[in-house]
Image (cartoon, coloured by chain):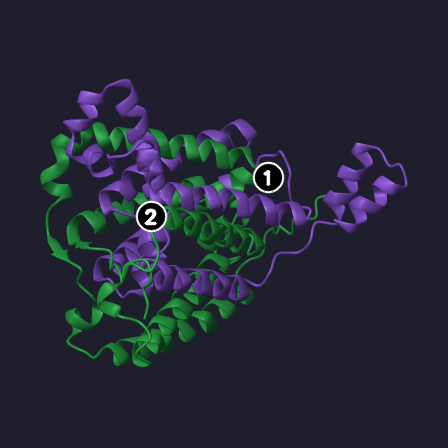
Amino acid sequence: MSTIAAGNALGATTAEIRVRARREAAPYTSPYLAGVGIGIVLLLSFVLMGRGLGASGAFSSVVTATVQAAAPGHAAGNAFYARYLVDGAAGPLGDWLVFEVLGVLIGGLTSGLLAGRLRWTTERGPAITDRRRLVNAFAGGAAMGIGAKLARGCTSGLGLTGGATLSVGSWLFVVAAFAGAYAVAPLLRKAWQ
Amino acid sequence: MAPFYELGRFGDGMSLVVAVLLGIAFGWFLERGGMGNARKLAGQFYFTDLSVLKLMFSAILTAMLGLFWLTWAGLLDLSRIYVPETFLAPQIVGGLVFGVGFATGGLCPGTSCVAAATGRKDGWALIAGMLVGVFVFGEAFPAISVFADSTARGAWTLPQALGLSYGVVVGIIVAAALGVFAGAEWLERHAERPAQPTDVTV
């Protein structure tokens, strides 16, 4: 940030600032340190709320809110959507996890901004096109959407929260998820390397 | 005595403020650890960068030990802490499907938000895919609910399943995690090493 500010003071163009910010993107923090940070946040969530962190539940709330807006009767008659239907003016979007994930977006943006890592780009392996990568990301997301809903959670709600509370199903989910990932990883080598 | 919200120390409005603040900190540390970068995450599946495993286990260890010590000190009522419920078969099958998606997409639901927030188009594509996947699941739910709701075991914990005390299980997991960390460091040193995403592109 300081270099960007200095660049501005010297009358650098936006393009120059962008190049500079790109060159000087800060290295990532050690995963152990970042992990301990997330662990403290998770512990704070237990202490303050009595519940842990999550992610995929917010996606369910967004989908449920959309279905409810389009076809209220259909949403109410489906036992899955009904789980996420809540009373109150905000409807499904008033859910705790929706607010938490909103925070994740803000926190990720802030951290990326301060580290000079904001970039409108597509992260992909060198051997595939951007379009292929976006198709893969969409397909992977769809599979995770189905898998997470079947398992009732994802790497956050089951992996972290269930891991720390020693939930049997959560630990089984994590083992199964890594098994599934490692089973198909050899087929996807071209996409990443 | 914790947990404060569960014990009525603050209300619903405040709980949403807490949700946003906790989310901000969660997103911050995910981004700091490089979890918004799908190339870095994918290294997990080729043994070139085991950050995902290290970060996850460090976080679990920290929160697990915190819960254990706060309970031991009498500062926290563990019975009021939500434990994700176990549904054996759906969680194993769901985990496998999730894992296939994880390796294909290179991000998980939480990290896709960080990727999207920092401008990664693949993060946005993955979020769109997630929403479609959840919708497909929702529409299919009436047909698969018998399986999805099967093998329910409630808030079943490892100490109960293994017939061991809370402290012993915590100790076993700490020891296992330290072994995993040592193994991860060894694997990273010995894996064939393609280009690492260093995030210095110019």
Q: Residues within 10 Å of mark 2 (few under 14, many from 20)?
A: few
Q: Secondary structure at mark 2?
A: helix
Q: Is residue A151 visible?
A: yes
Residue that protrudes farthest toward the top in the picture? A70
Residue B120 in which image quadrant: top right
Q: Which residue is mark 2?
A: B12
Dot 2 amino acid type = Asp
Q: Nearer the viewer, residue B28 or B91?
A: B28
Residue A189, given in percent of the width and then of the height, sits at 47, 44
Is B197 on the left-hand or right-hand side of A11? left
Q: Which residue is mark 1?
A: A126
- In which chain is the residue bearing label 1? A
Q: Circles 1 and 2: CB distance less than 8 Å? A: no
Q: Nearer the viewer, residue B191 or B115?
A: B115
Is B135 on the left-hand or right-hand side of B178? left
Q: Is residue B172 visible?
A: no
Q: Nearer the viewer, residue B105 or B24?
A: B24
> In the picture, which chain is green?
B
Dot 1 amino acid type = Pro
What whole-number distance in Å separates the C-alpha atoms at marks 1 and 2?
Answer: 48 Å
- Same-chain status of marks 1 and 2: no
**Discs 1/2, front:** 2
Q: Residues within 10 Å of mark 1 (few under 14, many from 20)?
A: few
Residue B179, given in percent of the width and then of the height, sits at 41, 74
Residue A180, given in percent of the width and then of the height, sits at 32, 49
> In the picture, which chain is purple?
A
Residue A67 in which image quadrant: top left
Mark on residue B168? none
Q: Assign the C terminus of chain A to one quadrant of the image.
A: top right
Residue A164, given in percent of the width and then of the height, sits at 33, 65
Q: Residue at x 30, y 76 (%)?
A: B71
